[in-house]
Amino acid sequence: IRDQDSGTFVILTSKKADYNIGLFYKEVELVTNKIVSAFGVDLQNLSNFTAEDKEQIAKSTWQGRVWGVYQTLIALEINQGTNKLSISIGPFRFSEQPETL
């Protein structure tokens, strides 16, 4: 996604073969723990997925997680419209317009 004001973002979501399958707590747990193992605790000093995360997801109050890596934000969140787990990386800000492929 390229936003003229904010910069460029990469958004990652899963694509399931059966679109009726909803969000699984295990999916959120595995992705959260994998990001924690790669980048460490998030910006709120939270580590691996916990029962509190599961409870917040069930109540639709989970705010996701955000990490700061080399001045780039990595956000793990549940999209409220699609109910899909997504990872947002960015913004990437380029001093010059990158070449298009």
Image: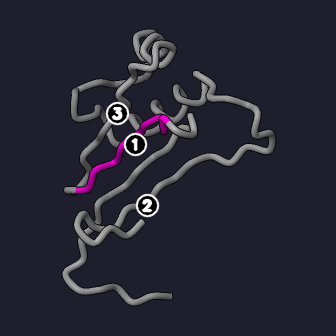
Q: Residues within 10 Å of mark 3 (few under 14, many from 20)?
A: many
Magenta segment: 72-80
| Image location of residue 52, percent across then percent down | 40, 11
| Image location of residue 24, percent across then percent down | 63, 25
Asked if residue 43 is positioned above or below residue 72 in the image, the reply reads above
Q: Amino acid at mark 2?
A: Val
Left or right: residue 26 compared with residue 41: right
Q: Amino acid at mark 3?
A: Arg
Under tag 1, what secondary structure? Answer: helix
Which is nearer the N-term, disc 3 or disc 1?
1
Rendered residue at 46%/30% (across/down): 33
Under tag 3, what secondary structure? Answer: strand
Please state which of residues 41 and 58 is positioned toward the viewer in this rendering. Answer: 58
Q: Amino acid at mark 1?
A: Ala
Taking the magenta stretch, the answer to whether it contains residue 74 is: yes
Which is nearer the N-term, disc 2 or disc 1?
2
Rendered residue at 32%/58% (across/down): 90
- 3D distance between C-alphas at marks 2 and 1: 18 Å
**Magenta stretch: helix, strand or loop mostly:** strand
Rendered residue at 46%/10% (across/down): 55
Which is nearer the N-term, disc 2 or disc 3?
2
Find residue 40 and report its image quarter: top left
Do the residues under discs 2 and 3 have CB atoms within 8 angstroms? no
Left or right: residue 48 compared with residue 44: right
Taking the magenta stretch, the answer to whether it contains residue 15 is: no
Instruction: Please give the residue where the numbered disc 2 appears in the rendered image.
Output: 10
Q: Quadrant of the N terminus?
A: bottom left
Instruction: Please give the residue where the numbered disc 3 appears in the rendered image.
Output: 65
Q: Which mark is residue 38?
A: 1
Q: Residues within 10 Å of mark 2 (few under 14, many from 20)?
A: few
